[in-house]
Image (spheres, rainbow, N blue to C red):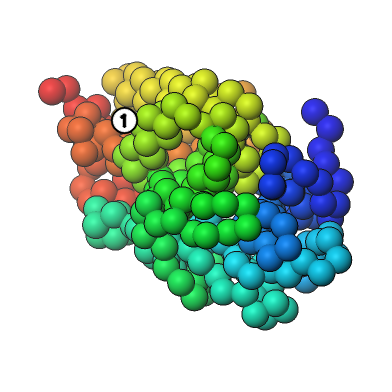
Amino acid sequence: MKAPVAGVMEQVAQGVRRCLAPNPSPMTYWGTNSYVLGQGQVCVVDPGPDDPSHIEALLDGLEPGETVVQILVTHAHIDHSPGARILSARTGAPVLAYGNALAGRSARMAGLSLGGGEGVDTGFAPDICLANGEVIQTSAGEVTALWTPGHFGNHLCFALPDGVVLTGDLVMGWASSLVSPPDGDLTDFMASLDLLSGRSEDQLYLPGHGECVTSPLARVAELRAHRRMRHDQILGALSQAPGTAEQLAARIYTDINPALLPAAARNVLAHLIDMNAQNLATPAGQLSAGAVFHFSSR
């Protein structure tokens, strides 16, 4: 699949335009998708990284006379939210999101010492905090904020008219999301997938990275199955021998680029924490990123 050209505005759905940020990487695929909703007085979703050139491309891509009046952010990762500060300073538009970088974190995760913090925009603070289910009036119609933690505690999806949902990093077509505790929470991630799977009216997902997802419910089912498969793999590996998240990842992820093993280990840790809550895996000593986990037979 050919990637779009960074910095070029293109229509991807009724009332929705996309402008790709120039930040490709193994974790962002071809870069961050910034979306422009509506016409005239427009709303920008996920202005992307701290890159003034991308903000310039966004503004240059607007039609003559158009102005940015709202900025929505799906979550506080450095490839999604820092550009909001630049765009707000340029346009005066307020930034709307669920909350700061710690908002939405579960009490369980808040009480653990797990390292993590990869790519977090720690200084992120919206001008307006959005509640789950809150409706934002835009020139593209009513946009509903859906609190969907899991990849990140303050993660929101945005449901637009006509069955279009901006899914941020919760659901993407090219890869499964990183779930790295304590910012990520696998229990919450699965619950958020359940929320989307119950929305039978949705027809199109516009993710934070990669191409549009044209069979959204099928993709959600694939992601659920993928996580169940990883759960079974980890549990099977634990039943053979104890291990840390890093050791288990090396035993399970045998066919990936070694540079991605640290991210894989964070995903495994998320599964282990979830298993610990289900009394399926027990750490030797305090639960931590480096703890050795043992199989627990119930």
Q: Out of 136 and 147, give the one closest to the viewer.
A: 136
Residue at horizontal 81 percent and vertical 38 percent from the top:
3
Residue 46 visible in the picture: no
> Compared with residue 37, is residue 256 higher up or lower down, i.e. above or below?
above
Residue highlighted by disc 1:
242
Question: x, y percentage for residue 37?
Answer: 66, 54
Question: x, y percentage for residue 159?
Answer: 51, 45
> Compared with residue 215, is residue 67 higher up or lower down, i.e. above or below?
below
Question: x, y percentage for residue 187?
Answer: 32, 39
Q: From the viewer's perspective, tell me whether residue 233 is left or right of residue 34.
A: left
Q: Please identify the quadrant where the N terminus is shown.
A: top right
Question: x, y percentage for residue 241?
Answer: 32, 25
> Compared with residue 247, is residue 94 higher up or lower down, i.e. above or below?
below
> Compared with residue 227, is residue 10 higher up or lower down, i.e. above or below?
below
> On the image, which quarter does residue 65 sit in?
bottom right
Would you call the spot at circle 1 few (<14 residues within 10 Å), some (14-19), or many (20 or more)?
A: some
Q: Say what amino acid the circle numbered 1 marks.
A: Pro
Residue at horizontal 23 percent and vertical 37 percent from the top:
276
Residue at horizontal 23 percent and vertical 42 percent from the top:
284
